[in-house]
Amino acid sequence: MQKGRIHSIESMGLVDGPGIRTVLFFQGCKLRCKYCHNPDTWEMQGGKEMDVSEIMKMLKRFQPYYGNTGGITCSGGEPLLQLEFLTELFKACKKENISTCLDTAGYGYGDYEELLNYTDLVILDVKHYLSEHYNGLTAGDFSVPTKFLEAVKKKGIPLWIRHVVVPNLTDSKEHIKGLREYIKAIPNVEKVELLPYHTLGVEKYKVMGIQYPFNDLLPMSKEKTIQLQNMLLDSIS
């Protein structure tokens, strides 16, 4: 039986997909986003080792709370880095009629075909829609999430898009217009959400002895984020 490394578990998540959900935060991430608030999830060797049967036992205990819409959401870190374990877990969930949601930046490797056969919803964190800016923001390769998105589009899986709005970086009207065009080309998007940049993770960097890239940057205004969200949604719908 596959074993995975889990950073933490939230038993009653309300913002990680529809309904009440158990959220598994996977350990490990290859991206180094400049605004990351969970640097403690980066290393693959951290977290707690768990097998699928252990997790299923817990999920069945919580299942009465899920109702018709709730279920499990696998987040991170980056769940796709533990692809075989994630696939086995989602397969087991579908046998028990537990709804599956994958919250991801799309930054994994391998063939996603089997995993997506057991995935009800994908929440995709779009870091940036332009290759050169994507690399500058995440130190990652834009072709990696692009490949994952193509697999999701091919399967026609319902998709929620999330995008962090960072002051002076991704908060201009021009940027939002570009994001709108990027999203318009994706056929299976059900929801789009802009998230304001915050500084809640800064303390973790100090504790871990890591330099925080955006040291002098103030949190994003929630009011401006709402304005940009309205502008984005008006032009998509």
Image (cartoon, rainbow, N blue to C red):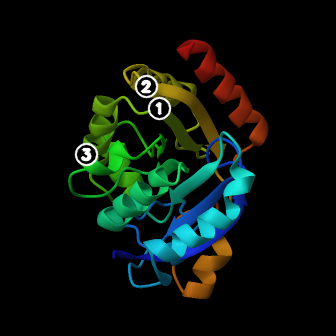
Q: Position of residue 88 (x, y in %)?
A: 36, 62
Sooner in the amino-acid sequence: mark 3 or mark 2 = 3
Most foreground residue, 78 or 34: 78
User: Given contact means CB atoms under 8 Å apart, are the residues at marks 1 and 2 in contact?
Assistant: yes
Compared to residue 9, the image places residue 96 above or below, namely above
Label 2: how many residues lie within 10 Å, few (<14), some (14-19) or many (20+)?
some
Sooner in the amino-acid sequence: mark 1 or mark 2 = 1
User: Given contact means CB atoms under 8 Å apart, are the residues at marks 1 and 3 in contact?
Assistant: no
C-alpha separation, residue under disc 1 versus residue under disc 3: 15 Å
Placement of the N terminus among the 4 image quadrants:
bottom left
Q: Residue at x 34, y 74 (%)?
A: 2
Q: Which amino acid lies under the numbered mark 3 shown in the image of this protein?
A: Glu
Most foreground residue, 80 or 66: 66
Q: Which residue is mark 3?
A: 113
Q: Position of residue 155 (x, y in %)?
A: 31, 32
User: Given contact means CB atoms under 8 Å apart, are the residues at marks 3 and 2 in contact?
Assistant: no
Q: In the rendered image, which quarter is residue 35 located in? A: bottom right
Q: Position of residue 158 (x, y in %)?
A: 47, 32
Secondary element at image label 3:
helix
Closer to us: mark 3 or mark 2?
Answer: 3
Label 3: how many residues lie within 10 Å, few (<14), some (14-19) or many (20+)?
some
C-alpha separation, residue under disc 1 versus residue under disc 2: 5 Å
Left or right of residue 185, residue 17 in this image: right
Q: How many marks?
A: 3
Placement of the C terminus among the 4 image quadrants:
top right
Q: Which residue is mark 1?
A: 158
Q: Which amino acid lies under the numbered mark 2 shown in the image of this protein?
A: Asn
Residue 188's label in the rendered image is 2
Left or right of residue 140, residue 76 in this image: right
Secondary element at image label 1:
loop
Answer whether residue 116 is visible to the viewer in this image: yes
Q: Residue at x 62, y 63 (%)?
A: 60
